[in-house]
Amino acid sequence: MPAPRNIGIVGARGHTGAELIRLIARHPLLDVAFVSSRELAGQSVAAQVPEFAGKLRYENLDAAAVAARRADAVVLALPNGMAAPFVAAIDAQNPQCVVVDLSADYRFNDTWYYGLPELTRGRYAGQRRISNPGCYATAMQLAIAPLKDMLAAPPACFGVSGYSGAGTTPSDKNDPEKLRDNLMPYALVDHTHEREVTRHLGMPVEFMPHVASYFRGITMTVNIWLDRAMTRDAILQHYRQHYAKEPLVRVVDAAPWVSTIAGRYHAEIGGFAVAPGGKRVVVVATLDNLLKGAATQAMQNLNLALGFAELEAIPHE
Ligand SMILES: NC(=O)c1ccc[n+]([C@@H]2O[C@H](COP(=O)([O-])OP(=O)(O)OC[C@H]3O[C@@H](n4cnc5c(N)ncnc54)[C@H](OP(=O)(O)O)[C@@H]3O)[C@@H](O)[C@H]2O)c1
């Protein structure tokens, strides 16, 4: 039985931080060492995350104070561009600490392990620095990976996210008024997640993101040109086989709906509409951007790095 460990969360006020606290509350071998938020400093965690029954309060901790806590693991759930001082302080004071960064800051850094477990766990070799994939990037990679060696052209990915994907800093993309009766396209070329998927799948993808008026969940509709003709049935069987041993990736027949994935911990892949001629297939993936797109995946990565069963604390049937 592995020893219990403790974990700190920086940026814990955000949507992903709150989901992670909920998951840690379910974990039999993980305790919360600290949760850091400037805005909520002094407030009870249970007030924000009722599932958390402990007496813990948010604290406002800078990088040096985070490192000085000497936690077994630290999750950085900060907006992009803010991880470096925390990583530097932990490198200096507590190098054995496992750091999982939820931002894009280290997804392009070869010295960090890129943790999309269903596709990359074979490359995990004890690294203590882990970059957690982006939410859209997770959906794209899970949807494309089984056909990766049969592509005739870059897959085109049309993504729609709930507005929790835009974080808590006010912007058009998380303003319910501006989103009402609306679908908001943005960053239609060269989005960070387009570059992330291109890098980690090792082949170009095209990605067009949109934000919708609901809170959580992503639909990723991917148009794929194959280098050979395939029947729908053969493609469906291929996906089923590819993910047969992955409880957090479910292959379904019909195109999945985002309304049924909100609050769930896994991703679904389905649709498999095949155009006449058998060389063009449209695959649909859904996931909850805050869970399999962020906190579930962070928990899988923490479990892997801390020596626990990968799915510990993660509900899955
Ligand atoms: N939302 C998603 O669906 C999703 C999915 C996958 C990955 N991610 C990534 O995960 C990270 C966290 O995202 P999120 O949506 O949970 O939260 P967020 O709203 O982007 O930010 C999280 C927290 O960081 C703190 N923060 C903001 N600016 C800061 C600054 N200048 N210095 C220090 N702290 C600051 C804020 O808390 P205080 O102001 O209280 O300190 C804020 O609540 C982001 O990098 C995001 O790209 C998000």
Image (spheres, grey):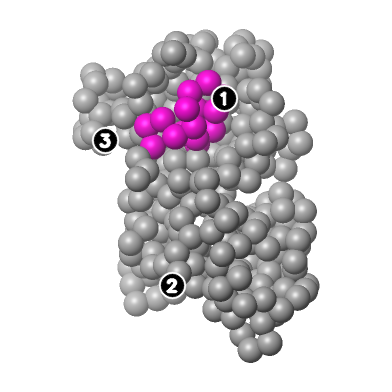
Callout 2 amino acid: Ala
Q: Is residue 155 above or below residue 18?
A: below
| Label 2 with label 3: CB-CB less than 8 Å | no
Circle on res. 49: 3
For disc 1, the marked residue is: 305
Q: Residue at x 44, y 40 (%)?
A: 295
**What SS does tag 3 mark?**
loop
Which of these two is toward me, 148 or 163? 148
**Which residue has dot 2 on it?**
254
**Is residue 258 covered in magenta?**
no
Q: Position of residue 218 (x, y in %)?
A: 45, 61
Residues in magenta, as a range: 298-314
Depth order, front residue of 78/19: 19
Please tell me which of labels 1 and 3 falls first in the chain: 3
Residue 156, position as x, y percentages in the image: 65, 71
Pick the front one: 98 or 1? 1
- Say which residue appears at 46% left-offset and 47% top-offset: 248
Are the residues tagged 2 and 1 within 8 Å (C-beta)?
no
**What whole-number distance in Å separates the C-alpha atoms at marks 1 and 3?**
25 Å
For the residue carrying disc 1, how many other residues have a C-alpha within 10 Å: few (<14), some (14-19), or many (20+)? many
Q: Which is nearer the eye, 298 or 171?
A: 298
Amino acid at dot 1: Ala
